[in-house]
Amino acid sequence: MNSTATVYDTQPKSPPGDLAIWVFILAELLVFAVLFVVYAMARRNNIELFNLHQLQLDRAAGLANTLVLITSSYFVVRAVAAIREGETQRCSRWLWAAFSLGALFLLIKGAEYQHHFSMGVTLRSNDFYLFYLSLTFFHFMHVIMGMVILAAVALKAQRGGYSVSEHTGVETGASYWHMVDLVWLILFPLVYVMH
Amino acid sequence: MTKTLSIPRPCTRIWLLMMVLTFITWAVAQLGLSGQWLILGVLAIALVKGQLVVDHFMGLRRVRGFWRPLLTGYLLLLGAALAGAFFL
């Protein structure tokens, strides 16, 4: 057997985590893709309005939240690596660190919403804000959902509920969190930058 | 053993690369640039970062079968649809 065949044989057939979460992830990615394309199509009808209001968004907050989510995703990768090495407590600490960054994301986004609402912005202000608020709030809810999953997995890891041989739950939670990150990586440039 | 520990994990290098790419996206916007090249450049960076998440964070690079091509196809199709909506 040559080395290529050996490497191929050691590659898993299924993605990390429970297969059901991947079906869910694919469905979620499809929904977000449709929303992103609808945003881009709606922008075609009123490019000047979209460009004008996009410039009023707090790009520094968008940047901060992107860095926060990327870093939290990285922490989750470290949590998975830790449990694969049998380090349950280290796994739990990385997951709580990722959870904390999720909370920071919500705080920053919440401050942005607070600013918009104080300026009288609502869903009915114009088409740009209709899409901006809907898209980002839909993602906001996914961050909350991801944090609930991370907390549940972190608590179980803390109690020694995972091991080197059985840690599907950690990989399942991690995969969902990476999806939340992946979606934001498209959303940020699309809504905050591209004009 | 010590030598192994002194080398950053591959995921750490990927994380740093994604942070740099994010800063580039933001800096380009801060320079006040706009138009076709900004849109294409920023979109390309977003797709590259998405592929890095798929490969190295989700770990699909090491998974056999259709999973990685499926997610890569998703990113490419989405990128093409967004570019089409912005330019056509």
Image (cartoon, coloured by chain):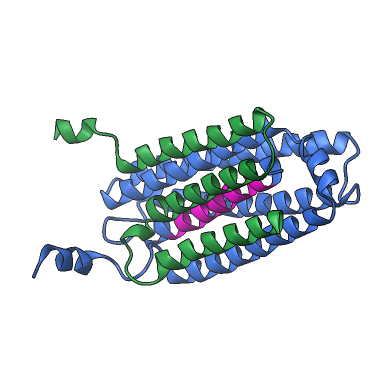
Chain colours: A blue, B green
State which quarter of the image contains the N terminus of chain A: bottom left
Q: Quadrant of residue B3?
A: top left
Residue B84 lies, in percent from the top left, at 66, 59
Q: Is residue A132 left or right of residue A144?
A: right
Does the magenta stretch mainly form a helix, a strand or a loop? helix
Inspect this view and state whether residue A106 appears.
yes
Relative vertical location of residue B77 with respect to residue A115 in this rendering, above or below:
below
Q: Which residue corresponds to the image point at 70% horizontal and 46% vertical from the top-left?
A: A191
Q: Is residue A176 magenta?
A: yes
Residue A2 lies, in percent from the top left, at 10, 67
State which quarter of the image contains the C terminus of chain A: top right
Relative vertical location of residue A53 with respect to residue B31 in this rendering, above or below:
below
Count of numbered tags: 0
Inspect this view and state whether residue A167 appears.
no
Q: Give the extent of the magenta segment.
A: A172-190
Decide which of A49, B63 is in the foreground and name it.
A49
